[in-house]
């Protein structure tokens, strides 16, 4: 047994006057040049030329995009490019310099303007690969030595990048992602992100995973200056810098998150000016001072100097690997084109400004360095330029005529059908910090919340990759004491409190899931899911599809639904219908202790993201729950009671109202009602519902959600669509009134659906 | 751009028409003046010619469907030219449509209440859904009950419904089947298949097969007896004549005309090559008599009387499909020979269903001649808008008294139907006798045929 992770805060009031010292943040401290780097053997001549080549590849590709729009790219003059034109020309020094400082297994996340980072992470990684890895990338390439193999892999890299831009089946994401969602998980690229700031919590979660699995890998999170005004980005900075990762609470895993927040500060968020207009700080680097006493080792870096960027990222990565992360780098660079090609730029900046930045172009100035340092001459540079242009042209020509994805495959990669059947040996049955919490059984019965706890305990004991976090879930055991005792058993590295940052809780869990863990995150109230809806809906739900199935997102978000407690409009909502509308998510809602345990275990082992809805009204409900291992499959409805005259379909607490209504119908009218608990809304077990309605000819669909837009409507309409000829009456729906949950007990009782509402609906069609 | 082909407005009162047949296929070249399609209007089938040269790009309105006049029925243009989305929308004010001719299926708009959204979208207060009691009675049946009835090949329309709003539900159909002894019904498979296809009610078919089995022949007999929709022409006949009988109080005056001399004169003229028919003589006699009795050549709306200064003479023509009345305009201006020519033309067009609406409108007096049909006497119904109609029967050899002797003469009965609002008995008697006298006056005919 290791040291107990429990601790009690024991501070004292202290009001002596003093001054907070925010320290200093260095700017442009790089004093070197290529000659000094070579001399100090920080770099070889070959590596120095490779850096130029990486920058040229980026510029060549982005200039191709610009030219394609006017039919001016000679190799594929007639190609009709459909897609975004968010080019980063001018920022190559930042992308190439940062990636040159990363190792093959290090991760990056990127942005909607992310061609540069995606290309550079790939080219750098290819040169770092062993021969076997290279052969895996270009299996069609049989002969030749390493040099030829690298060349083939580079061309394949450019080809697959252009294919993705063109939406081709050979693209990195099989044409599902495109320019703004390009990813290559084989080189640690976890994805560009078209939601500004949306990738930052994913990077933070990936760093959490790297730290937890002690991989020694760093995440370099590229995001623009515009993103640093976005809530989830600020949440992520705070999340990454939490004291509990580095102080006595961290225990065996001491060390900050290995993440570099690299601000690609091109001074414009789309078109607005970060300087002097929408921000109150002169440098984005100041952001770091708000989140960590050490200012996150922040620096301002000259992004027009590729060597300065490389040097800064090398030092930042070293800090991260030493457990001193996170690090924030404010990299000062410039975007020559507008937000996209439809942006004329003259509405917000001067030509003189552009000319001044172009005069210090990162590629041109680096060419001069190469010549000055004697690495190569004008002819040598021209040869590199020619090689890059020709290689890109060959790749573009191939990409233009490459196969499109088949139209019938439009939904391929929506969900994965895999789950964790067996735990890899390295993660199986991890050691415990303390004893497992005692779960009291009376006559074989457990409460709903203890059933959930038992599921979590069993799954965490089974698989080291299962971690659990959320607001107040550790020492306190959660607002509803569902997880009391987990932290003591599994330690703070696996069960920890988070700041009140719902978007970041879900986003980091998504990132961790995409990078090797199987996290369970808790939303204290379902209502708070609206704060994290981007991370649930645009990120967790979409990455399996958008990456062309390169990644899976084995994530469970537990959301606790209120209602009936007089908590008012912001703590009482039943919102699963909204998330059923988001393809890519699973949405489940158990109604009994037995299902709570069996389904949570299934959800944790599933490789799809699962929104797991729980009902606070049911937490205290008791039922028989076998102690041992069992799973309730997702997507299978449960016929609670068989009947022949009417079908009552429901989920959540309303299932129990339906059972009571069925009793009354039997007693008062001799009507035999069949009651179906859907349990799982996505995937939906339509078959069981339709077969029942075919038998009975009548149906009431009930849930606790407000009537308008409720998933009950989806089910009712599907019934009439599929089995219309079996209906003996219109399908009825029961839900809460179309209103806002009120505090008043009288009003709330009038607001929520009850047994009488179900009876009224049933009697109207019997 | 493709040129739309428009459904012409054939008569002033025509509001909708149906295409009988397209004479060109999609993609077929069309020369200027080519017939594009034929149209059934109230009384005839019209040919529609193309104004332009081109290719028939698209047929929008299929044959058999009534569409408002001046709506787009197709497109003409160059091959491959894009064709705009055309929907058949009324170009006339729908309120102006003549309701009586519409098939009696659409309930008033209020009856559709239950079908519109009953779920309040914005209003927080509950929205009143029309209750079963307030909605007009409409046959309601659940899909499940309908499916059972369909599978059993029975008509559920008379089954009493026990569901909400009187809806027939499955158990009602089951009870009905039991009460009607459906389980004992014997039907041959082919009979059931045909009855199902034709949507018949097996319980309403008397079986004549072995021990009462319903056979294919039984089903075929029922199909033959089934009411069929009236043609447009018959509907118009029904509507107009009913209107006349209801609004115009008819009375009848019959006279016998001695046609012996006129028949002889006609035979004589025919030998000389003159093509006059008995109808021509009657028409001429009527026109001349109308000049003497302007009251008979008039019309009324029940409040005022209008004398018509011209005689537009209607001649009822019997066709296989029904009855049409082409009108000889300005008959009072025409000679006997011209009357003969014009009536022949119109009769031919009528038989070919090619009369234009204007050729059938505006009559002031009508003759209905059944002389060739071997009838003793009959009465006719006045065409709405006219004051009287003359029903002419067959000329028959009859014993009559002349100069105190019984002789055989060719006698023809004529019955005048008069609208009593305009014409009294005495006038009718004088008028019809005026016609008779002219027909019996050989001096007149010798003069007119000279």
Image (spheres, helix red, strand yellow):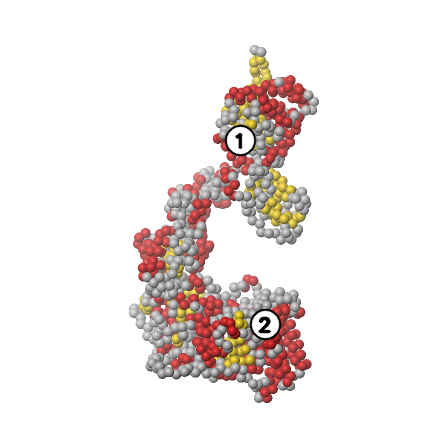
**Residue at 46% over, 43% down:** B107
Q: Which residue is mark 2?
A: A350
* Residue B318 locus on image (x, y percent): 58, 31
Q: Nearer the viewer, residue B447 or B345?
A: B447
Label at residue A245: none
**Residue at 40% over, 77% down:** A494
Q: Nearer the viewer, residue A225 or A41?
A: A225
Q: Which residue is mark 1?
A: B384
Q: Secondary structure at mark 1?
A: loop
Q: Which quarter of the rendering shows the N terminus of chain A? A: bottom left
**Mark count:** 2
Res A757 quadrant in image: bottom left
* Residue A196 locus on image (x, y percent): 50, 70
* Residue B319 locus on image (x, y percent): 58, 32
- Tell me the subunit letter for badge 1: B
Determine crowd level at label 1: few under 14, some 14-19, many 20+ residues with C-alpha closer than 10 A: many
């Amino acid at each position: 047994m290791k040291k107990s992770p429990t601790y009690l805060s024991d501070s004292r009031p202290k009001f002596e006057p003093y001054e907070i010292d925010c320290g200093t943040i260095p700017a442009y401290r790089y004093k070197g040049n290529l000659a000094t780097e070579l001399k100090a053997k920080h770099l070889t001549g070959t590596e120095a030329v490779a850096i130029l080549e990486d920058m040229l590849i980026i510029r060549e590709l982005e200039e191709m995009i610009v030219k394609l729009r006017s039919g001016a790219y000679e190799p594929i003059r007639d190609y009709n490019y459909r897609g975004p034109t968010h080019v980063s020309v001018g920022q190559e020094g930042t992308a190439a310099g940062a990636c040159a400082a990363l190792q093959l297994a290090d991760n990056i996340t990127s942005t909607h303007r992310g061609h540069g980072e995606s290309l550079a992470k790939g080219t750098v990684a290819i040169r770092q690969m062993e021969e076997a890895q290279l052969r895996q990338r270009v299996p069609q390439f049989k002969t030749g030595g390493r040099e030829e193999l690298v060349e083939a892999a580079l061309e394949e890299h450019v080809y697959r990048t252009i294919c993705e831009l063109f939406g081709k089946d050979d693209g990195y994401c099989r044409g599902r992602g495109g320019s703004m969602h390009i990813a290559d998980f084989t080189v640690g690229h976890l994805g560009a992100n078209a939601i500004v700031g949306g990738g930052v919590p994913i990077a933070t979660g990936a760093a959490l995973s790297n730290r937890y699995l002690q991989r020694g890998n760093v995440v370099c999170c590229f995001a623009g200056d515009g993103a640093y005004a976005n809530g989830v980005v600020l949440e992520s900075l705070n999340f990454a810098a939490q004291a509990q990762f580095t102080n006595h609470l961290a225990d065996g895993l001491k060390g900050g998150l290995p993440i570099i927040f690299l601000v690609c500060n091109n001074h414009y968020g789309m078109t607005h000016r970060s300087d002097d207009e929408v921000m109150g700080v002169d440098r984005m680097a100041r952001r770091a001072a708000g989140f960590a006493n050490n200012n996150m080792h922040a620096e301002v870096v000259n992004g027009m100097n590729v060597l300065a960027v490389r040097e800064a990222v090398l030092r930042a990565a070293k800090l991260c690997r030493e457990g001193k992360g996170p690090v924030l780098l404010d990299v000062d660079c410039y975007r020559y084109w507008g937000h996209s090609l439809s942006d004329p730029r003259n509405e917000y900046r001067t030509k003189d400004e552009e000319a001044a930045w172009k005069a210090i172009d990162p590629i041109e100035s680096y060419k001069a360095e190469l010549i000055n340092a004697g690495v190569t001459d004008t002819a040598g540079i021209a040869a590199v330029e020619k090689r890059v242009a020709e290689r890109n042209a060959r790749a573009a020509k191939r990409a233009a005529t490459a196969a499109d994805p088949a139209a019938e495959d439009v939904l391929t990669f929506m969900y994965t059908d895999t789950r964790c059947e067996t735990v890899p040996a390295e993660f199986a049955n991890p050691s415990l910090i303390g004893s497992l919490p005692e779960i009291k059984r009376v006559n074989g019965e457990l409460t709903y919340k203890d059933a959930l706890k038992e599921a979590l305990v069993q799954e965490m004991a089974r698989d080291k990759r299962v971690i659990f976090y959320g607001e107040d879930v550790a020492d306190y055991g959660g607002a509803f004491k569902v997880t009391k005792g987990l932290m003591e058993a599994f330690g703070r590295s696996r069960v920890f409190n988070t700041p009140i940052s719902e978007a970041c809780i879900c986003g980091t869990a998504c990132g961790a899931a995409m990078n090797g863990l199987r996290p369970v995150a808790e939303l204290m109230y379902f209502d708070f899911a609206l704060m994290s809806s981007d991370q649930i809906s645009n990120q967790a739900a979409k990455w399996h599809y958008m990456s062309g199935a390169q990644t899976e997102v084995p994530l469970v978000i537990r959301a606790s639904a209120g209602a009936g407690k007089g908590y008012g409009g912001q703590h009482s909502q039943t919102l699963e219908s909204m998330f059923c509308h988001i393809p890519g998510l699973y949405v489940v809602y158990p109604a009994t202790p037995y299902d709570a345990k069996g389904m949570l275990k299934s959800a944790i082992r599933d490789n799809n993201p699962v929104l797991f809805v729980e009902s606070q009204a049911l937490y205290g409900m008791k039922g028989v729950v076998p102690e041992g291992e069992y799973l309730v499959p997702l997507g299978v409805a449960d016929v609670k009671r068989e009947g022949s005259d009417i079908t009552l379909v429901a989920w959540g607490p309303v299932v129990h109202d339906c059972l009571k209504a069925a009793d009354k119908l039997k007693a008062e009218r001799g009507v035999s009602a069949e009651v179906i608990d859907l349990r799982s809304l996505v995937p939906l077990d339509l078959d069981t519902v339709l077969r029942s309605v075919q038998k009975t000819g009548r149906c009431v669909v009930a849930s606790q959600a407000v009537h308008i837009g409720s998933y009950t409507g989806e089910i009712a309409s599907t019934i009439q669509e599929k089995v219309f000829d079996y209906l003996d009456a219109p399908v009825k729906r029961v839900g809460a009134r179309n209103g806002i949950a009120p505090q008043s007990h009288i009003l709330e009782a009038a607001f929520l659906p009850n047994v009488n509402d179900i009876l009224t609906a049933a009697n109207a069609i019997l | 751009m493709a040129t739309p082909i428009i459904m012409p407005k054939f008569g002033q009162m025509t509001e909708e028409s149906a295409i009988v047949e397209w004479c060109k296929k999609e993609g077929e070249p069309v020369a200027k003046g080519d017939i594009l399609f034929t149209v059934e209007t109230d009384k005839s089938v019209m040919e529609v010619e193309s104004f332009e040269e081109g290719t028939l790009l698209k047929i929008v309105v299929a044959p058999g469907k009534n569409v408002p006049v001046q709506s787009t029925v197709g497109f003409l243009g160059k091959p491959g030219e894009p064709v705009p989305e055309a929907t058949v929308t009324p170009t006339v004010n729908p309120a102006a449509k003549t309701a009586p001719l519409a098939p009696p299926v659409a309930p008033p708009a209020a009856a559709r209440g239950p079908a519109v959204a009953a779920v309040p979208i914005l209003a927080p207060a509950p929205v009143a859904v029309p209750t079963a009691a307030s909605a007009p009675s409409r046959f309601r049946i659940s899909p499940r009950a309908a499916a059972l009835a369909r599978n059993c090949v029975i008509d559920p329309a008379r089954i009493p419904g026990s569901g909400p709003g009187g809806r027939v539900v499955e158990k009602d159909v089951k009870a009905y089947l039991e009460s009607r002894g459906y389980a004992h019904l014997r039907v041959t498979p082919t009979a059931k298949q045909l009855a199902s296809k034709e949507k018949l009610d097996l319980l309403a078919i008397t079986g004549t097969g072995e021990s009462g089995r319903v056979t294919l022949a039984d089903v075929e007999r029922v199909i033959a007896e089934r009411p069929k929709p009236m043609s447009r022409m018959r509907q118009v006949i029904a509507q107009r004549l009913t209107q006349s009988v209801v609004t115009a109080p008819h009375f009848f005056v019959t006279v016998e005309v001695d046609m012996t001399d006129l028949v002889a004169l006609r035979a004589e003229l025919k030998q000389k090559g003159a093509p006059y028919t008995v109808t021509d003589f009657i028409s001429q006699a009527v026109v001349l008599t109308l000049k003497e009795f302007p009251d008979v050549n008039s019309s009324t709306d029940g409040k005022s009387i209008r004398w018509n200064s011209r005689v537009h003479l209607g001649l009822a023509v019997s066709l296989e499909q029904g009855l049409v009345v082409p009108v000889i305009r300005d008959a009072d201006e025409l000679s006997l020979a011209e009357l003969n020519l014009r009536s022949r033309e119109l009769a031919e067009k009528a038989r070919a269903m090619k009369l234009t609406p204007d050729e059938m409108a505006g009559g002031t007096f009508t003759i209905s001649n059944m002389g060739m049909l071997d009838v003793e006497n009959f009465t006719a119904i006045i065409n709405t808008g006219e004051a009287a109609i003359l029903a002419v029967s067959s000329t028959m050899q009859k014993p009559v008294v002349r100069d105190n002797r019984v002789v055989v003469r060719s006698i023809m009965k004529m019955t005048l139907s008069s609208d009593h609002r305009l014409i009294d008995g005495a006038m009718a008697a004088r008028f019809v006798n005026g016609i008779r006298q002219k027909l019996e006056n050989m001096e007149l005919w010798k003069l007119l045929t000279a």
